[in-house]
C-alpha cells in the first residue's frame, strides 16, 4: 500500500551561475548526514535514486574535496523528495493521520532561458511546456546572485534591473502560450520570495538590508515584474511578489576549502514550501474574500494540513464522516498558530511521539526563528 502524501511544489528561478545546483546539492546532502538524521523526526528521500545520488555526490565533493558541482546549462529538471516520518506512534494512530508523507517537488527553471532569445519554434515550445510544468507550485524563489551584487557594488541597480527585466520579458513572452483564450490562470505560483544566494559573500547583509537594497535600487523594475506576473493570474489580490525575502548560503567558501556546515537559510526551504502557503492563503481569504473557486484551489487540502499541524486524527466509520469535518475555527486556529501556542503544540506532539505534527509545527518554529535571526522576512499582507 502506497503511503498517503501531502504534496507541495516550489519553483526556483535564477540566472545561470546564480547557485541553484549548489543550493540544492547542499540542501539534500546535509539531510543525509548522520547528525541530521539523529536530531530530526523524518528522513528526506529522493524519489529518483539516481538524482539523489548525484546531489549527494555533489555535496560530498564540496565537503571532502572543495570541488563545486559542474554547472548545468539549459537543464529543466524537477526533483521530488519524500519527507517520511520516523515511526514513533502506535500503528492505530498512524492509520488515522490525515497523511503519512510530505512530498516536496523542486522545479529548476534554466536561467539561460531568461537571458537568451528563442532559437527555434521547438525551443519556444519546450520553454512553454517547462514553465507550464511548474504552475502547480505555490512558492517561487527568485535568486539574486550575491557575487553579482559584489561585482556591481555601488551600481547594483545595473544588475538588478537586468535580472528583473529578463524575468519580466520571459514571463510576457510566454503569456500567449500559457493562457487559453486569454483567460487568467487560477493555478500559478502566488508567493514570489526574493532570495539572496551566496549570502556568505555579504556577511554584513541581513534580510532587512537586502530588502532595502532591492527597494532602493530596483523598486520600479520589481513592480513591473509584479504587474507582468499579475497579468497571468486570476484573483491578483492573492499574489505576493517581492514582499518576502530570505538569505541563502550553501556553505562557507574559502580558497581550497568549503565548509558545508556553515550554511544560511537552507533549513528554511522545506518550511517555505510546506507550510508558508497554508498560512498565507488563509490570510488572503480572510482579507480579500477570494472567489470560492480560487479559494478552493488554494486551500484544496488545507483541512489535512490543519489536522496534521494540530495532531488531530480522522475517525473511521459513519460517525467519523461527521466528526472529520474541519470547520473554519479549526482551520483558522491552525493557520494562525504562532509563538507560545505553537511551541506548546510542538512540545505536546513530541511528548506523544506524533512526529508528523512535531515536524510541521517545527517547520513553523523554523520560520519564526528565521525572522528572529534576520534571515527571513515574511510579508504581513
Image: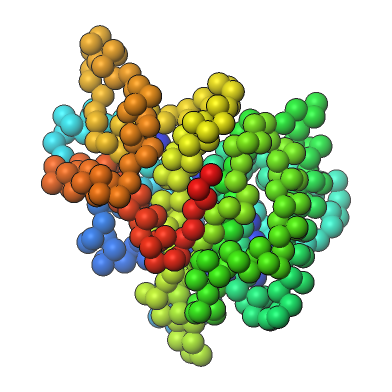
Q: Where is residue 378 in the image (x, y as percent from the top left)?
A: 49, 53
Q: Can residue 169 be seen in this view?
A: yes
Q: Position of residue 286 (x, y in %)?
A: 49, 31
Front residue of this view, candidates 19 and 73:
19
Q: Residue furthest bottom?
A: 255
Front residue of this view, candidates 377 and 278:
377
Say which quadrant the N terminus sits in: top left
Residue 240 shown left or right of residue 230 in the figure: left
Front residue of this view, candidates 107 and 328:
328
Residue 227 shown left or right of residue 303 in the figure: right
Q: Is residue 29 visible?
A: no
**Residue shown at the point (62%, 77%) measured from the top left:** 147
Q: Where is residue 295 in the image (x, y as percent from the top left)?
A: 53, 27
Counting labels gives: 0
Above or below: residue 281 compared with residue 322: below
Front residue of this view, candidates 156 and 124:
156
**Residue shown at the point (84%, 54%) measured from the top left:** 118
Residue 86 shown left or right of residue 160 in the figure: left
Query: Where on the picture, by quarter, is residue 21?
Result: bottom right
**Residue shown at the point (80%, 46%) measured from the top left:** 172
Above or below: residue 371 compared with residue 274: below
What scheme was used to colour the molecule? rainbow
Residue 223 shown left or right of residue 199 in the figure: right
**Residue shown at the point (37%, 74%) measured from the top left:** 261
Above or below: residue 314 compared with residue 126: above
Q: Position of residue 189 (x, y in %)?
A: 60, 42
Amino acid at each position: 500500500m502506497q503511503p498517503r502524501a501531502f504534496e507541495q511544489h516550489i519553483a526556483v528561478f535564477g540566472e545561470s551561475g546564480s547557485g541553484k545546483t549548489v543550493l540544492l546539492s547542499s540542501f539534500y546532502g546535509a539531510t543525509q548526514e548522520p547528525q541530521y538524521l539523529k536530531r530530526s523526526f523524518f528522513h528526506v528521500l529522493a524519489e529518483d535514486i539516481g538524482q539523489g545520488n548525484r546531489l549527494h555526490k555533489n555535496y560530498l565533493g564540496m565537503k571532502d574535496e572543495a570541488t563545486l558541482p559542474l554547472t548545468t546549462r539549459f537543464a529543466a529538471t524537477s526533483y521530488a523528495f519524500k519527507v517520511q516520518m520516523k515511526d514513533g506512534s502506535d500503528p492505530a494512530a498512524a492509520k488515522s493521520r490525515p497523511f503519512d508523507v510530505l512530498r516536496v517537488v523542486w522545479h529548476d527553471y534554466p536561467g539561460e532561458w531568461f537571458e537568451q532569445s528563442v532559437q527555434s519554434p521547438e525551443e519556444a515550445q519546450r520553454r512553454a511546456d517547462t514553465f507550464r510544468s511548474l504552475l502547480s507550485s505555490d512558492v517561487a524563489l527568485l535568486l539574486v546572485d550575491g557575487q553579482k551584487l559584489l561585482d556591481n557594488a555601488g551600481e547594483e541597480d545595473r544588475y538588478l534591473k537586468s535580472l528583473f527585466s529578463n524575468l519580466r520579458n520571459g514571463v510576457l513572452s510566454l503569456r500567449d502560450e500559457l493562457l487559453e483564450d486569454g483567460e487568467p490562470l487560477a493555478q500559478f505560483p502566488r508567493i514570489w520570495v526574493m532570495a539572496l544566494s551566496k549570502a556568505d559573500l555579504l556577511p554584513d547583509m541581513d534580510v532587512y538590508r537586502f530588502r532595502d537594497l532591492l527597494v532602493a535600487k530596483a523598486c520600479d523594475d520589481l513592480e513591473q515584474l509584479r504587474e507582468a506576473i499579475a497579468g497571468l493570474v486570476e484573483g491578483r489580490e492573492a499574489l505576493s511578489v517581492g514582499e518576502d525575502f530570505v538569505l541563502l548560503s550553501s556553505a562557507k567558501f574559502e580558497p581550497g576549502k568549503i565548509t558545508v556546515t556553515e550554511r544560511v537559510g537552507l533549513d528554511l526551504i522545506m518550511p517555505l514550501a510546506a507550510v508558508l502557503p497554508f498560512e498565507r492563503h488563509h490570510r488572503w481569504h480572510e482579507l480579500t474574500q477570494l472567489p470560492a473557486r480560487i479559494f478552493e484551489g488554494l486551500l484544496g487540502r488545507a483541512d489535512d494540513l490543519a489536522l496534521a499541524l494540530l495532531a488531530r486524527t480522522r475517525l473511521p466509520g459513519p460517525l467519523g464522516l461527521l466528526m472529520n469535518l474541519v470547520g473554519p475555527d479549526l482551520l483558522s486556529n491552525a493557520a494562525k498558530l504562532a509563538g507560545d501556542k505553537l511551541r506548546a503544540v510542538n512540545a505536546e506532539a513530541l511528548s506523544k511521539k506524533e512526529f508528523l505534527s512535531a515536524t510541521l509545527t517545527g517547520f513553523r518554529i523554523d520560520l519564526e526563528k528565521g525572522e528572529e535571526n534576520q534571515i527571513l522576512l515574511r510579508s504581513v499582507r
